[in-house]
Amino acid sequence: MKLLTHNLLSSHVRGVGPRGFPLRLQATEVRINPVEFNPDFVARMIPKVEWAALLEAADTLHLVEVPKGPIEGYEHDEKFLRQMHHVLLEVDVLEGTLQCPESGRLFPISRGIPNMLLSDEETET
Amino acid sequence: MLKKLKSAERLFLLIKKQFPLNVSSESKGKIFNEMQRLVNDDPESWLSAISIWKNLLELDAKKDKHSRRDANPLKRKVGENDITNPKKLKTEQMQELQESRECQLEKQMEAETVEHGGFLTSGEKPPEAFQNDVVKAAGTPDRKDLTFRVSCRCSGTLAKTFTAQEVGRVIGIALMKQYGWKADLRNPNLEIFIHLNDIYSVVGIPVFRVPLASRAYIKTAGLRSTIAWAMASLAEIKAGAFVLDPMCGLGTILLEAAKEWPDVYYVGADVSDSQLLGACDNLKAAGLQDRIELLKVSVIELPLPSESVDIIISDIPFGKKFKLGKDIKNILQEMERVLHVGGTIVLLLSKDHHKRLQDCEQSGIPLNSKGSHTDEPGIEKCLNPGEKTDLSDTVSSSSEAISQGGLDKMPPFGSLVPMECYQVSLGRTDAFIYKYRKSHSLGL
């Protein structure tokens, strides 16, 4: 699971609503994957990023060189884009958990795939 | 490069196309003669087609270092009644061999477009080399020892009098006499396809041994790849979009989309471990594991914030095994929730789902003026995009225009406004491709 994906996931445990974001990340196995750098693609993802969530996750994974926020003219700033590319796309959490910040419910990540299935009682109406 | 035709099932070099053989009053013998004439008349067209075919093969062999063609050529016997490309995409017009390769290689840039049904498309990107070859071809005598096989399909009135075997045999013998080729049923160099029915008689040579629908980059296909590609192309995928397939199965749709539109963020989800494993395998085999993310989630409970997804494309599974079939409304509701306003949804629905949606009373919201519910009697099928020849244009211009006609059967679903609907054939069954756009926020 990449951090770009983590940035979008939110808990849907009953009653939690928007307080189910962001999910707290815990990783037991992480892999760094080189991914082809596509500056256009990264630039387009930047406006969608929830920065607080990203920084929190990056911190848990002890990543360095993580930009704190979008900078002026980021679309053309290669260094910035490369850093974001690395953080968003090259860090892959293979094993770990995601925790709902409100209910505490844990969702496991296994083989890089987060399992967010809820049992019937837990789902929202 | 012909392999770039993504919505076409098979591609043939046309040798002949003419009016149907007249079966009604003549004796069998006479009709056999007519069939022989298909072979013997006009050897020019045969020879030039064969030349082109040879050229294509050479070109292909040069370009393709790893020849994909030896991956299991389909076994076909002479006279099989069913040509083994069972899953044709049906359209109202029989566009099949019409424009496909009339031995003139036109440079239309409609390469990927199909009339959504494109059994055979009208466009391609031929290399320049060919332009001149056609002219020369007719003169070159090609009498190397070619082995061949005839595959024949008959339907309509003709089929009542003849079996495909008989026809195949007649044609085969005529060819042997005319060109001196040898017949080889198992592994011929050249395959001749004949299709005779009440509308036309067509003879052609398949360009590839394996149907175009079988892709080199997909290890295990779920949904037919031609339909997957067609759905993806309807979805108006643009660079930087977030595309979700919440019931991705083996990931076929995402694979087709990611191959064609690379600068996009793709996420696939499924509830089944085995499907996700299969999808993972497929992604790795295609080299796309970095561009497509997988999640184990349920489509009726998507762990995504509202209005966070740009495009949803999905093949909604049907059949008795799939228990969510009845929950089509819940599925659509959840998809509606996570979709951005202005986003598109493209779904493949069974007839059952289609029916349930029609009965659906979700719409409290009136359609905008262009898409009013007209009760036009007699419009059975959904709109067929026969008129649109260029997909890439249709996509951008259809934002407000709702196609008339077939949509009278497609009610809106909450804020999801139906845009287009196509009936497609999946072989034994038919299905519908629906496209919706979210017209306004749900205000949750």
Image: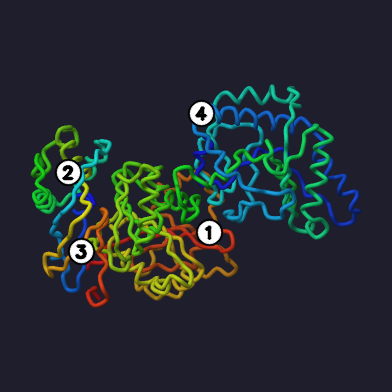
Q: Give the Cα separation between the discs numbered 1 and 3.
A: 44 Å
Q: How is the image coloured?
A: rainbow
Q: Which residue is mark 1?
A: B383
With B304 as the anchor, is B160 left or right in this view? right
Count of residue discs: 4
Q: Give the Cα separation between the discs numbered 1 and 4.
A: 40 Å
Is the residue marked by circle 4 packed among few (<14), some (14-19), or many (20+) residues within 10 Å? few
SS for dot 4: helix
SS for dot 2: helix
Residue at 55% across / 46% down in the picture?
Answer: B8
Amino acid type, label 4:
Lys
With A15 as the anchor, is B127 left or right in this view? right
Q: Give the Cα separation between the discs numbered 3 and 2.
A: 22 Å
Residues behind callouts 1 and 4 on a single chain: yes
Q: Position of residue A19 (x, y in %)?
A: 13, 65
With B332 as the anchor, is B51 left or right in this view? right
Residues behind callouts 2 and 1 on a single chain: no
Q: Are marks 3 and 2 in contact (CB under 8 Å)?
A: no
SS for dot 1: loop
Q: Which chain is home to disc 2? A: A
Q: Which chain is home to disc 1? A: B
